[in-house]
């Protein structure tokens, strides 16, 4: 089968169809999305080797009869089931976890993928492939609400309004909080407006004024910027991993008693309910769809600044 593999460089390869082992089923990938983590992996992030890709919707083509033919999405953390975190049902923090397309597990930029049945969620018929492919990042966005209690009258600012950032802002908006999104490009501003968010430029935000700031930039500058916007006793949610240490004034965290919250993977079932409600159309986020055969061109496109979601269709 065709697959996009990373082994020091990204290439389109011909590899054997995976053979499911243990409680795995065989999935035929219908649609997959490129995220920033995938781009980072092709720059050597986490020293991953194998088939890339972790945001997908697929069909079960081999497995237990109750799953056969089902359209599914899959959680990306494959847990051991035995460590202390698994025993406390905190499986996304399993100490021995593999992560689809990120750590010790092949990913979804391929025709087929073998994945544990434990990781699967059925996609309702009302949710199209083009919406379902967003379940993984949307779940990650909803995780902010699992970790921080936002009140409807709060003043929230999100910076880093890219692929994940816009979804995070959309999730925050569900609390009816006043969510302002720092944007530089008109495309992002238009999506933000369509979703009931308030696009703003940097100089429109009063320094040290926001009760909650979400940083989706993943950059040192972004962290410093976020710290400059937050008010005393505010909460700073960090949604992206950082390359290197931000040159930030950490004393401000102490003096102004700022709470810092890290946030990673989130609830798939909640993301599916959100999409099933039909309340929101995520398709404006889709920039282009490429066949897997054109996967390298798809990555090139996804690397361009300001580009939102690039999809791969095996
Ligand atoms: Zn991702
Ligand atoms: Zn475990």
Image: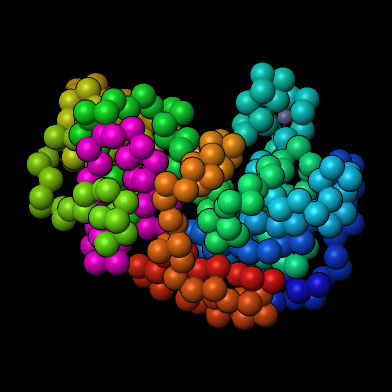
Nearer to us in this view, 290 or 232: 290
Residue 58, above or below 24: below
Give left or right: position of 28 versus 263. Answer: right
Name the foreground residue: 90 vs 170: 170
- In the image: residue 156, left or right of residue 39: left
Drawn side of residue 101 relative to residue 137, left or right: right
Q: Is residue 247 visible?
A: no
Residue 301 vertical placement versus 63 (above, below)? below
Residue 128 sits inside the magenta stretch: no
The reply to whether residue 17 is visible in this rendering is yes
Q: Position of residue 73 (x, y in %)?
A: 66, 49
Report the number of numbered marks: 0
Residue 229 image-quadrant placement: top left
Residue 186 in magenta stretch: yes
Position of residue 266 measured from the top left corner of the image (x, y, whole percent): 53, 37
Q: Nearer the viewer, residue 292 or 235?
A: 292
Q: How is the image coloured?
A: rainbow
Which quarter of the rendered picture does the N terminus lie within?
A: bottom right
Q: Which residues are magenta?
A: 162-189
Q: Residue at x 72, y 20 (%)?
A: 87
User: Residue sitting at 46 percent across and 66 percent down?
Assistant: 286
Position of the C terminus, as image quadrant, is bottom right
Q: Is residue 162 above or below residue 81?
A: below
Determine the residue positioned at 36% across, 46% down. 170
* Left or right, residue 149 beside residue 63: left
**Residue 80, horizontal then vertical, whole percent:** 77, 33
What residue lies at 29% left-to-right and 67% top-to-bottom? 187
């Amino acid at each position: 089968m065709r697959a996009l593999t990373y082994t020091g460089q990204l290439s389109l390869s011909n590899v054997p169809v995976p053979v499911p082992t243990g409680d795995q089923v065989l999935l035929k990938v219908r649609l997959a999305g490129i995220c920033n983590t995938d781009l980072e992996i092709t720059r050597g992030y986490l020293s991953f080797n194998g088939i890339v890709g972790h945001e997908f919707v697929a069909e079960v083509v081999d497995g237990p009869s109750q799953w056969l033919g089902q359209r599914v999405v899959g959680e990306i953390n494959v847990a051991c089931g035995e460590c202390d975190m698994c025993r406390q049902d905190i499986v996304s923090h399993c100490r021995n976890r593999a992560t689809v397309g990120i750590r010790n597990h092949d990913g979804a930029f391929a025709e087929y993928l073998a994945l544990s049945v434990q990781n699967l969620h059925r996609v309702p018929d009302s949710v199209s492939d083009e919406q379902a492919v967003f379940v993984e990042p949307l779940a990650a966005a909803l995780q902010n609400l699992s970790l921080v209690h936002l009140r409807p009258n709060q003043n929230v600012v999100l910076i880093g309004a890219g692929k994940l950032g816009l979804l995070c802002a959309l999730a925050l908006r569900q609390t009816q909080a006043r969510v302002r999104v720092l944007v530089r490009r008109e495309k992002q501003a238009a999506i933000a407006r369509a979703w009931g968010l308030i696009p703003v430029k940097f100089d429109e935000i009063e320094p040290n004024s926001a009760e909650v700031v979400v940083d989706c930039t993943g950059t040192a500058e972004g962290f410093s910027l976020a710290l400059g916007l937050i008010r005393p006793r505010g909460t700073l949610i960090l949604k992206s991993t950082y390359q290197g240490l931000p040159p930030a004034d950490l004393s401000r965290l102490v003096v102004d008693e700022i709470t810092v919250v890290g946030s990673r993977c989130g609830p798939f079932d909640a993301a599916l309910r959100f999409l099933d409600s039909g309340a929101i159309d995520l398709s404006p986020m889709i920039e282009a769809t490429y066949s897997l055969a054109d996967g390298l061109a798809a990555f090139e496109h996804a690397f361009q600044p300001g580009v939102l979601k690039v999809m791969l269709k095996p």
